[in-house]
Image (tube, helix red, strand yellow):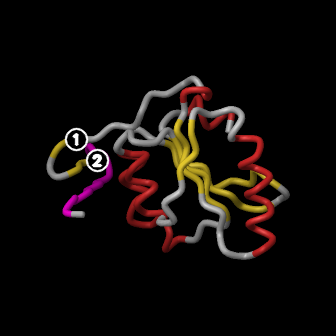
């Protein structure tokens, strides 16, 4: 990869000097979502449950295993959103500004079994349904 992503507060997110924008997806059935299962057994089991429901509602689910890459790919419009369990600051610190400045939404809230699971979405509409 020779891509350079740049995010600066109150400015456009850029890829190799060109502005990038999230998908303006509003229909969950057309969404392509990337997901991570984590590495601990209980987290994997929790994400399996989420995935088994989500797979019936979205167009596709993808998995790369690199949170920073997943986030910038949402910012670039390649994916509609990302669901990541137990996200930590080092997983997203550099990429968060890029997703926000490309028009996306970063939400590290509790969505399942009282555990923190992050939803990084290309649109606020998808955030409400995922």
Residue 73 in the image: x percent, y percent?
Answer: 39, 50
Q: Residue 22 vs residue 107: left or right?
A: left
Q: Residue 17 vs residue 64: left or right?
A: left
Query: Could you tell me how far apart the alpha carbons at marks 1 and 2 are, in whole angstroms?
Result: 6 Å
For mark 2, does the 10 Å Cα neighbourhood hold few (<14), some (14 to 19), or many (20 or more) residues?
Answer: many
Residue 83 in the image: x percent, y percent?
Answer: 61, 52
Q: Residue at x 44, y 54 (%)?
A: 71
Image quarter (top left, top right, bottom left or bottom right) of the C terminus? top right
Mark earlier in primary sequence (1, 2): 2
- Mark 2 lies on residue: 13
Which quadrant would residue 42 be assigned to in this image? bottom right
- For the magenta stretch, what is the residue range? 2-12
Magenta stretch: residue 8 in it? yes
For mark 1, does the 10 Å Cα neighbourhood hold few (<14), some (14 to 19), or many (20 or more) residues?
Answer: some
> Where 125 sits versus 38, above or below?
above
The label on residue 80 is none
The label on residue 19 is 1
Q: Residue at x 69, y 53 (%)?
A: 109
Pointer 1 with pointer 2, Cβ within 8 A: yes
Image quarter (top left, top right, bottom left or bottom right) of the N terminus? bottom left
Which quadrant would residue 2 be assigned to in this image? bottom left
Disc 2, SS: loop
Magenta stretch: residue 72 in it? no
The residue nearer to you, when weighing 121 against 51, is 51
Disc 1, SS: strand
Q: Main secondary structure of the magenta part?
A: loop
Q: Residue 13 vs residue 38: left or right?
A: left
């Amino acid at each position: 990869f020779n891509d350079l992503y740049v995010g600066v507060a109150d400015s456009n997110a850029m890829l190799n000097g060109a502005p990038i924008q999230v998908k303006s997806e509003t229909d969950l059935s057309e969404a392509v979502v990337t997901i991570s299962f984590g590495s601990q057994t209980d987290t994997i089991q929790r994400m399996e449950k989420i995935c088994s429901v989500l797979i019936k509602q979205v167009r596709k689910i993808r998995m790369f295993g690199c949170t920073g890459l997943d986030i910038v790919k949402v910012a670039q419009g390649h994916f509609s959103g990302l669901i990541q369990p137990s996200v930590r600051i080092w997983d997203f610190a550099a990429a968060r500004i890029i997703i926000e400045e490309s028009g996306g939404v970063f939400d590290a809230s509790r969505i399942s079994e009282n555990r923190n699971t992050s939803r990084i979405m290309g649109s606020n509409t998808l955030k409400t349904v995922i």
